Image (spheres, grey):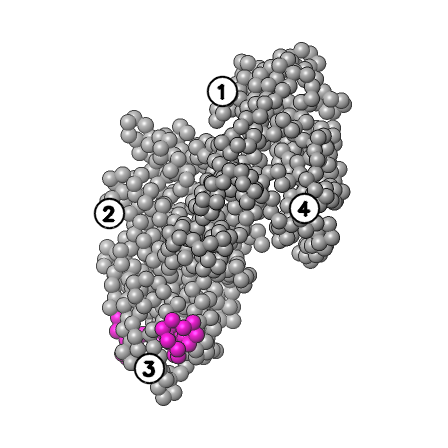
Amino acid sequence: MADLEQFRAETRSWLEANCPPEMRKPAEDENDVYWGGRNATFKNDAQKAWFEACRDKGYTVPAWPKAYGGAGLSPAEAKVLREEMARINARPPLSSFGIWMLGPALLHFGTEGQKQRFLNEIARGEIRWCQGYSEPGSGSDLVSMQTFGEDKGDHWIVNGQKIWTSYADEADWIFCLVRTDKDNKYQGITFMLFDMAGDGVSTKPIKLISGNSPFCETFMDDVKVPKSYGEDIPAYVGEINRGWDVAKYLLGHEREMISATGGGDRASSLGAVTSRQGELDPVLRAEMALFDVDALAFTAMSEKFLDEVKVGKGHPAQPNMLKYAGTELNKRRHELLMAAGGSRTLEWESDETEHGKPARSWLRTKANSIEGGTSEVMLNVVAKRILELPGA
Amino acid sequence: MPLYYDDDQAMLADSASDFIREEGSIAKQLRHWRDRDCKDGFGHGLWEQFGEMGFTGILLPEDDGGLGMGQVEANIVLEEIGANLTPSPFLSSSVLAATALKHGSDDTRGRWLPDLVAGKNVYAVAIDEGAKHRPEKIACKAEKSGNGFKLTGKKDFVVYGASAEMIVVAARTSGSESDADGITLFAVPQDASGMSHDSVRLVDSSMASHITFDAVELDGDAVIGEVDGGREILNAMLRAGRVGAAAEGVGVARGAMDMTVDYLKQRKQFGKLIGEFQALQHRAAHLYSEVEIARAVTIKAAQLIDAGSEQAELMTSVAKAKVAKAAGLAVKEGVQMHGGIGMTDEYDIGLYMKRDRALQEFLGDMYYHAGRVAELSGY
């Protein structure tokens, strides 16, 4: 305990010295955060300084081992760092699907060679990854996916189309579910890794109701994917034809990540924030209060979940519940923000709203309960795996 | 502090669960006493057993014969009481009254605590004045009289008041109705002259009193803590009692949900188990989510109280309100999903609905506590 308090003191003074003031307010949208990659640029000097300080300290991925670019923090230390960063509203220095998703999959399933190469690239923000899961005909029923990799001995020839690939147009590499056995539904999928700069890969942004295009369609036309990138660096995670295991493991992580946006790191009261902008109608105030009850309670649930994960307690299907509750909560949050903000929040392009941020964010949240597994699928999983209801 | 039980707490949870499921079951306690029209509304035998287990003094220091444990541990017992719908003076006596008596003088503690710890005595608390919980306003008056006080006024919703050997009464010794200060707590013995009970049975078969104090003479040593200094003790009682009621509510929700999910796996219609229908699966899964969240925030609030955190006040109200939502949903979905049989007195699910209704009101309902969350958050 004494060690932990010392770590807290050290962390506090390190943050004091290294986190620029501009980085000490919450990111308002995904573009306020540095995502890394071959073509990345920094929004400003503060963002660059903060990223580089964290990268050099291993704090882009604090809980990963030092050998893979992390800081090797224990779960308790990582929690202290999270708390101290939250205390000063420090932004994450680097966001990426590499950190949230591929990283955890490699830590669990990867070879030593894959970890050495890919994890370090992710931690240092050098390669930006995207995820190729959904297909036009395979949304909630993901396992029906058809993108096919034809075995050519030392390589595959991949053909097919992915959809809802987040930021595929800005990504360098893709981790992609590819069918390698047409006769075996669950055990015929391989979790491949390949460079999107190669021939045959093209992306097309999808314009959403928010007017933004965070998602793409990704097309693969005769893409040659070698089976290995060098000694102990296979081009697939886990085993050939066993990619569904990796995908399921990763979906767990994705659901945790999405659920965290619901309230986990936002302990501040929505009613307090909105009432400072103007008096709330009495019934809206009441709605705010009931929302704050749910949001604060959810914060405790997230904390409990994370504490339990560290010691292997809790039901393995619990992230599905968190994803469901967290995303539904976030949608409610934005409905209330629109109501409290009134006609100002309707503005689509004005400077005052920073190019329609309230409206665009409100619309964006509608995807929360669709992406990474719909609320309905989450409820199916809870019913089947936790409540053990029949035939679900 | 991690948000799960440590080894000692897990052990306590196991033994409390086994003991209360066995001895405090619906058949042995709630239905048993209700069907005999018992005027106490609970069993003294079980209360003595609580004493033997040490539960009666769970929050009291070891020097007072207690277990020296905290709110988290008291809540562990309460969750099991809730899950089994066990009628028990535990919340009133061992959480609310005990929290007050902890602040008493050596004489006060010596007079009242040994019989509580032994499971011999039952104590009640008299806070509410009116049909809704409004502890910010206290009109019940205690005027100086000789070396003591003369107590005048009315109190409502005094749970198990008629069975209590002593009642902790919050009264005004100075100022006017809405003042925060000027409150004093009194330990009023059962035989105090001028105190009359109108004891009524509630929807959940528990008993509660409307009490009238007609110039009740009290000795100076009836005062718990300082004269005019009762508000802080009262607030501590309310925190402990509210989060305790939340824990009991989590138990009620859990009990109702478990019963209902079991029923979905047994009942057949249209040639199928009704649990196969997605319309019911989604509602059950949503309910599970709400109950888990309510349970998490209740543990959180109890930990904050034990840590003496300034966040405890806010999170206690969050917990009470969230549990009200979740438990309310659990019992309503429970009755609906049971269909016709859920409406029968013979089946237990309706008893959960009744107990939940009483717990909702006790020490402030969802609306009261959501309003408090807003006020404490500054809006």
Q: Is residue B193 magenta?
A: yes
Q: Is residue A359 above or below residue B108?
A: above
SS category of the residue bearing label 4? loop
Residue that mark 1 sits on: A137
In this view of the protein, which residue sits in the foreground, B101 or A21? A21
Q: Horizontal and vertical percent for residue A259? A: 52, 40
Residue that mark 4 sits on: A74
Q: Is residue A339 above or below residue B72?
A: above
- The residue depicted at 45 percent of the width and 67 percent of the height is B235
Q: Split into 4 quadrants, where in the image is the N terminus of chain B?
A: bottom right
Mark 4: which amino acid? Answer: Ser
Residue that mark 2 sits on: B345
**Chain name for mark 3:** B
Gap between marks 1 and 3 measured at Cα: 80 Å
Of discs 1 and 3, which sits in the foreground?
A: 1
Can residue B84 be seen in this snapshot?
Answer: yes
In this view of the protein, which residue sits in the foreground, B310 or A90? A90
Gap between marks 1 and 4 measured at Cα: 42 Å
Residue that mark 3 sits on: B150
Please rate how many residues cluster around mark 4, counting C-alpha atoms within 10 Å: few if below 14, some from 14 to 19, many from 20. some
- The residue depicted at 51 percent of the width and 30 percent of the height is A208
Q: Horizontal and vertical percent for residue B354? A: 30, 52
